[in-house]
Image: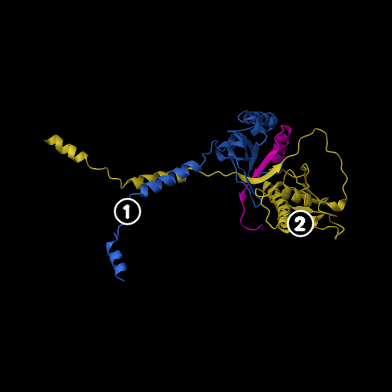
Amino acid sequence: MAKSRTRDRMKNEINAGSMADIAFLLLIFFLVTTEIVDDKGLRVNLPPWSDEPPPELEFAKNNVYSILVNSNNQLLVDGELMEVARLRQGVVDFITNNGRNPAWSDNPQDAIVSIQNDRGTNYETYIEVYNEVRGAYNELWERAARDRFNVGYEPNAMTREQTDYLKKTFPINLSEAEPTAFGDEG
Amino acid sequence: MSKFKKNRGKSDPAISTASLPDIIFMLLFFFMVVTVLREDELLVRVRIPSATELTKIEDKSLVNNIHIGQPVAQNQAIYGTSPRIQLNDKIIENSSLGSEIAKFLAEKRSELTESERSRMTNALKVDEQATVGIVEDVKVELRKNNSYRLMYSTNLRTGKLE
């Protein structure tokens, strides 16, 4: 008799009301402990290494936009002190000069941007400078893509021909010299 | 007119919460699937800089992380306070940088198939207070070992440059 009573009780369903709470707890635990690592940043292709010193190439001085960064994180651009914030516009103006200003490039194809840092330059400044130069090229590519194809520059949505056209119109002639070793390293 | 009245009378005021656990479980599974657990413990402090012209890496299995930064407080007694390089889960000696990088890359290459090797990317996670010198040394070693695809890991900067 007593047995049947127990069996009766067992027919009851498990209360699922607290299930949500348990799931919530688990959810919060995972939210707190996991860290979404997304890999994003500035892509670069390094040049191959060669033991010989690079060949001496002669370029017309006006076609080279030289950016020197010292160990105090100051910029010397074509012989003048400059703020990083003004660099992007400077690069754009230099590349699209087309011979108007004799001190700047003759045409975008010949324009070279040269960056040289010091071994003591802060990495943060290095990235800022590099980012601004890349930003200038992206701006030009965006502009060219709008003019020619009437679409914004979108690396993954462009056809091969479109990218080739952009590369020909505004080739990225970016040269990074070996850093100087005047300043102190941290 | 009467239609509306009838409907209102019939409706049950209590919302059923029976499907709530299912919804939460779905959320839970979503988070469990999308999150990647960090495999190596950081021995150096790395606060990566910010930039705007970012690219995202499609395939995470092809990325090798190289951390550069000041050793964390409990390691400073051994490794000092100037920026050091961490490969896998140990801080390497600056004097043996060349051989360590070669070993590191060989190990990573052996994990990949032939076709994937050419798409292998090295992600430099460098503290913003580190200097260009140590980064340059690493870059030279990577070039010597024919690994040319590089990424400077950065956050997205939303504000303007000061």
For mark 2, give the secondary structure.
helix
- 10 Å neighbourhood of mark 2: few (<14), some, or many (≥20)? some
The residue that disc 2 covers is A92
Query: Which shade of the palette goes to chain B?
Result: blue
Residue at 78% of width from left, 58% of height from top? Answer: A93
Residue A24 visible in rendering: no
What amino acid does circle 1 point to? Ser
Q: Nearer the viewer, residue A140 or A81?
A: A140
- Residue A46 at what x, y percent from top left? 73, 40
Residue B2 visible in rendering: yes
What amino acid does circle 2 point to? Val
- Residue A130 at what x, y percent from top left? 71, 49
What letter labels the chain drawn in yellow?
A: A
Q: Which residues are magenta?
A: B134-162
The residue that disc 1 covers is B16
Give the alpha-carbon distance from disc 1 to disc 2, as whole Å: 61 Å
